[in-house]
Amino acid sequence: MLWCDGRPVDGPVPFDLADRGLLLGDGVFDTALALDGRIAFEDAHVVRLVAAAETLGFAVPPERVVEAMRALAGTAPRTAIRTTVTRGPGPRGIAPPTDTRPFLFASAAPARPALAFAPMRLHRTAIRRNETSPASRLKTLGYLDAVLAARDAAAAGFDETLFLNTEGRVACTGIGNLLAVTGRTLVTPSLEEGVLPGIVRAQVLSLAKGLGLAAEERPLPLDACLAADAVILTNSLRLVSPVTAIGDHALGSLDNPVVASLSRAIREAVAASCGMAPEAVS
């Protein structure tokens, strides 16, 4: 299902062929999970998308983002909502136009319950995450590196891709953040390492202290990640996924008690955000 220009749309979204999102990837997007018509961590998703657009130099009213997301939230019991905003159309050339007309649209599809909390195996790609680029900390429309890396990962028999940054340190995957667990300590690459400010990542860091865990945002060398007791991938649809292997290196994430406690805590946080019982969050 689609939403565009203040209303649901049954057919294709009318799209200006001069739109800079189409021609230059000049735009940002957000993916959120809705359960029984309620959007998990709605405020955080809206704030991040609005801030990302501001970083690119154009404005999107937060109330319009809320309108779009809520219009689609009840289309399935478990819904994946993608909200996209571009700078809009512009004249030929790369420089942003002074007169911007941002274009906001959203789509929704049933989200597979099996994605949440499912284990994953990661394939190391030779493509590097460019931590010097502001775009590395935004969900921009330029996802070709992740697309190509995902293709290679699937061909090699893996679920997702591990990206290192240009310094050879762990950055993220193509679809989410990574956190390494050693003892009672969580370590996740800081945003300066070229990673997105993930919504579930932020929830995990916020919940850590209440679970008796230390949480650190800092550079994460690959060797330290491989030596960790466990590694998890976080994103808004998968929530907390234990990483069971990076390449041919096996990890004990699936049976790790810290991973189990984090999964329970995120399940409870999603349930509270959506006004339902934790057992309803599969």
Image (cartoon, rainbow, N blue to C red):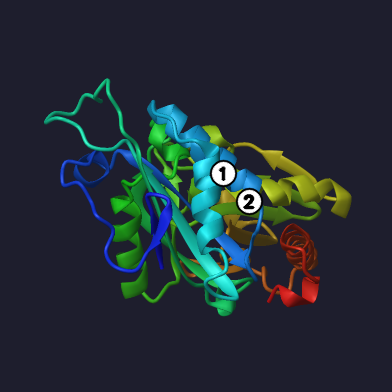
Q: Which residue is mark 2?
A: 42
Position of the N terminus by quadrant: bottom left
Type of the residue with mark 2: Glu
Q: Residue at x 23, y 39 (%)?
A: 20
Could you give the CA–CA distance between mark 1 and mark 2, rounded to whole angstroms?
6 Å
Q: Cβ–Cβ below 8 Å for labels 1 and 2? A: yes
Of the pair 46 and 70, the residue shown nearer to us: 70
Residue 24 position within the rendered picture, expressed as x and y whole percent measured from the top left? 22, 40
Residue 179 vertical placement versus 55 (above, below): below
The residue positioned 64% from the left and 53% from the top of the image is: 200
Q: Is residue 123 left or right of residue 26?
A: right
**Residue 218 visible in rendering:** yes
| 203 with respect to 73 (left or right) | right
Few, some or many residues within 10 Å of mark 1 (<14, 14–19, 20+): many
- Mark 1 highlights which residue? 46
Image coords of residue 117 (percent x, y): 64, 71
Q: Quadrant of residue 227?
A: bottom right
Q: Identify the residue at image location x=43%, y=36%.
A: 167
The three-letter amino acid code for the residue at tag 1 is Val
Q: Residue at x 52, y 59 (%)?
A: 71
